[in-house]
Amino acid sequence: MSPLQHKIDFAVILTVDHANPNGDPLNGNRPRVDYDGFGEITDVCLKRKLRDRLQEAGQSIFVQSDEKKQDGMTSLRNRAESAEYGLGKDTFNEKKTPKDLAAKKACEKWFDVRTFGQLFAFGGDSSGVSIPIRGPVTLQSAFSVEPVSVSSTQITKSVSGEGDGSKRGSDTMGMKHRVDKGVYVFYGSMNPQLAERTGFSDEDAEIVKSLLPRLFENDASSARPEGSMAVNKVFWWKHNCKAGQYSSAKVHKSLRVNPDGSYSIDESATEGLVPEVIDGF
């Protein structure tokens, strides 16, 4: 497969309905908000969800979450150096394999490596290595269109966690937080120049496009009940060249999203570049 031939920009509108889209562990796991009260979902969180959807679609993923890992590997290093699930120890030994060749093999092996990039930094012995790979696909954090209202509910537990059951355990007090309603937007881009280095192809881009509308499928938890988070629209701008007809900033700013989830596109700002609009699932 040939590397990506056209620059691509994309945007996603998503809705939150009584859910915690991305808790902040440094703030009691409250939904993330900036200093002006706008809700935030980090790019790391969004990449995690996209990796999960790719993995469910049968793609080989290097950075697997512990709860969804399929190979039993206990660390990234173990996965990378595994003869069965990775590339073997010799691949990540600079004395035996040149860095460029190791990076090429990693990109061929794992979808998320050739998409987002990866730093293979394994040290501690004579075979230590540091291989940086810069990926062609970038995601911005998602922000709400307007400030969000965060509700907090006090919860208790009255089940004995220890003991012989003869005595009732003391209630454990805690808090559960959620965003009542919110419309969020995030943007991304695909760079053909970087795709040439990793081998990210047009076919790979189509796979990502097909999964963006399903970003929150199979992602339910007590903080995000089934159906509480959903993709509303995906916008896909495919330029007619590798360099791009317009800058990503100009393309992204041509989309205006309203608090109710409706939108408008200023096509005069990007004449000749009309997005494909895909409905969420």
Image (cartoon, rainbow, N blue to C red):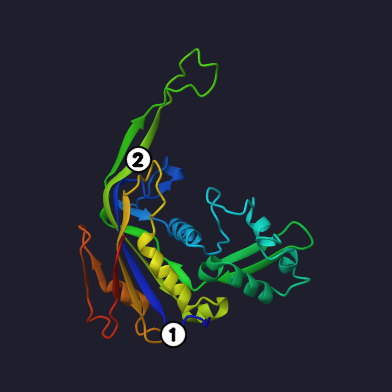
Q: Which residue is situated farthest in the front direction here?
A: 58
Q: Quadrant of the C terminus?
A: bottom left
The amino acid on which the numbered mark 2 sits, given as a three-letter code, is His
How crowded is the residue under tag 2: few (<14 C-alpha within 10 Å), some, or many (20+)?
A: some
The answer to whether residue 117 of the structure is visible from this angle is no
Look at the numbered discs 1 and 2 and tell me whether their residues touch, using CB distance below 8 Å.
Answer: no
Residue 58 rendering spot, x and y as whole percentages: 51, 62
Query: For the residue labelled by badge 1, is the local secondary structure a helix, a strand or a loop?
Result: loop
Mark 1 or 2 closer to N-term? 2
What numbered label is drawn on residue 177?
A: 2
Query: Residue at image x 24%, y 68%?
Result: 256
Q: Residue at x 20, y 57 (%)?
A: 260
186 in relation to 271, above or below: above
Q: Which residue type does callout 1 highlight?
A: Lys
Measure how far apart labels 1 and 2 are at the Cα level.
44 Å
Left or right of 140 in this view: 74: right
Please name the residue that numbered disc 1 is placed on.
Answer: 242
Residue visible at 33% across and 58% down?
A: 143
